[in-house]
Amino acid sequence: MTYVVTENCIKCKYTDCVDVCPVDCFREGPNFLVIDPDECIDCTLCVPECPAEAIFAEDDVPAEQREFIALNAELARQWPAIIERKAPPPDADDWRGRPGKKSLLERCG
């Protein structure tokens, strides 16, 4: 089992999770983070660190967010690793918890 970043991270992109990851499995896109399923060791450390509550165990991803399992795997192959915490976007708090953000996902810079 791996962990999955879901829709609530889009346009929030807090990186608190990156600081605690012992294997550097996070990948960074323009306005979203993903977890590389081949690198994740299922340690759970990232889950409580996510202010957006966007990280779930693969088996616990809500039904309406299941497409993010494949999306994390796909984008992890394309995006570079992020290994240090960065400041979130200035409007991250405005986007936290807003539904329907998938169409706002930017796949490339």
Image: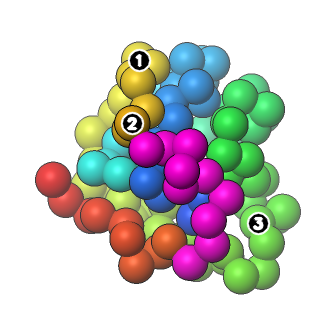
The answer for how far apart the CA atoms under marks 2 and 1 are is: 18 Å
Residue 14 to residue 32: above or below: above
Q: Position of residue 104 (x, y in %)?
A: 37, 71
Secondary structure, mark 1, is loop
For label 3, the residue is 61
* Residue for point 79% across, 72% down: 62
Q: Which label's residue is closer to the chain start, 3 or 1?
A: 3
Q: Which class describes the residues within 10 Å of circle 2: few (<14), some (14-19), or many (20+)?
A: few
**Up/down of 43 relative to 11, above or below:** above
Q: Amino acid at mark 1?
A: Glu
**Residue 84's mark?**
1
Instruction: Specify whether residue 19 is painted magenta.
Output: no
Magenta segment range?
A: 91-100
* Element carrying mark 2: loop
Q: Residues within 10 Å of mark 1 (few under 14, many from 20)?
A: some
Question: Which of 43 and 91 lies nearest the eye of the viewer?
Answer: 91
Q: Nearer the viewer, mark 2 or mark 3?
A: 2
